[in-house]
Amino acid sequence: MNKLDSSDMDADSPPASQKKTMCHESCHRFSKLLLTSFIILLLLLKMLFSVSLITLFKQHTQLPDEKAITKELNYTDLECTKQHSLSKDKVWSCCPKHWKPFRFHCYFTSNDSASWSESEEKCSSMGAHLMVIHSQEEQDFITKILDPKAAYYIGLLDPGHRQWRWVDQTPYNESATFWHPSEPNNDKNNEKCVVVNHPSSSWGWNDIPCSSKENSVCQMKKIYL
Ligand code: MMA
Ligand code: CA
């Protein structure tokens, strides 16, 4: 029997049809692997992008804090008093040296004459703003330590149409104002800034031209340690 059995003919190599199927399967597996790797790569890229975005955002949001710390460090000398039962961890309330404490704030009187905006600029460079007055107590506290021969800018301004605005954006309350009698008179239609002064018998507010060179009072929040 020389005749070879057809089934034995290509015993170790599979028939053509089976070969095709195998290649098809391995190719399919390969492309599946390729697709999976591509998706993983995309996910990794997306993660990397998100992380860098978050880092960038954090850096930006942390910036004001760091600036504030630098500002606080500018005050080398602080004068502090012990707090009574306000908070457990922060017991000292402080003002920079030469600033006067009153309630929750510190006040600094400047005897250099400057325009209103220059005065506000100087307060701002010290982390403060021109003084805001909302009560008889605050008016009395400050006038007791000022020189009656001088006039002092406060943080009150008319940006137009007799709309009085405080520099710290707190509302202007008509019932807590300390204008001299017949003030504000907007003399020559050119008086949009305010000083506290003592022209004859009492302390009070007067509107004056913003370019006028006057002393000023700065105000900042107390520092709690
Ligand atoms: C000055 C000036 C005004 C103020 C009057 C009060 C002459 O102008 O300070 O702002 O209203 O004095 O007499
Ligand atoms: Ca006036």
Image (tube, rainbow, N blue to C red):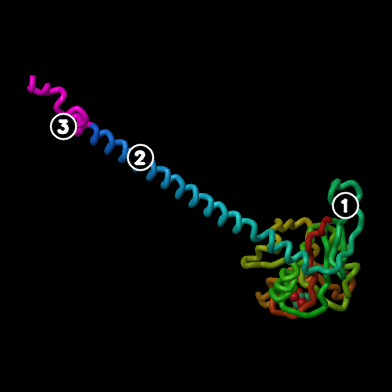
Mark 2 is surrounded, within 10 Å at the Cα level, by few (under 14), some (14 to 19) or many (20 or more) other residues, namely few
For ligand 2, the image quadrant comes to: bottom right
Location of mark 2 (residue)? 33
Q: State which quarter of the image contains the C terminus.
A: bottom right
Q: Indicate the position of residue 81 as horizontal and vertical percent values.
A: 91, 58
Nearer the N terminus, badge 2 or badge 3?
Answer: 3
Q: Indicate the position of residue 129 as horizontal and vertical percent values.
A: 74, 66
Nearer the N terminus, badge 3 or badge 1?
Answer: 3
Start and end of the magenta stretch? 1-21
Pair 2/3: label in front: 3
Quadrant in which residue 189 is drawn:
bottom right
**Marks 2 and 1, how far apart in space?**
64 Å
Pair 2/1: label in front: 2
Mark 1 is surrounded, within 10 Å at the Cα level, by few (under 14), some (14 to 19) or many (20 or more) other residues, namely some
Q: Nearer the viewer, residue 137 or 47?
A: 47
Location of mark 1 (residue)? 91
Three-letter amino acid code at the position of disc 2: Leu
Task: Tell me which residue sits at (77%, 56%) in the image.
Answer: 175
Nearer the N terminus, badge 2 or badge 1?
Answer: 2
Does the magenta run of residues contain 87? no
Pair 3/1: label in front: 3
SS assignment at label 3: helix
Task: Tell me which residue sits at (70%, 76%) in the image.
Answer: 118
Three-letter amino acid code at the position of disc 3: Ala
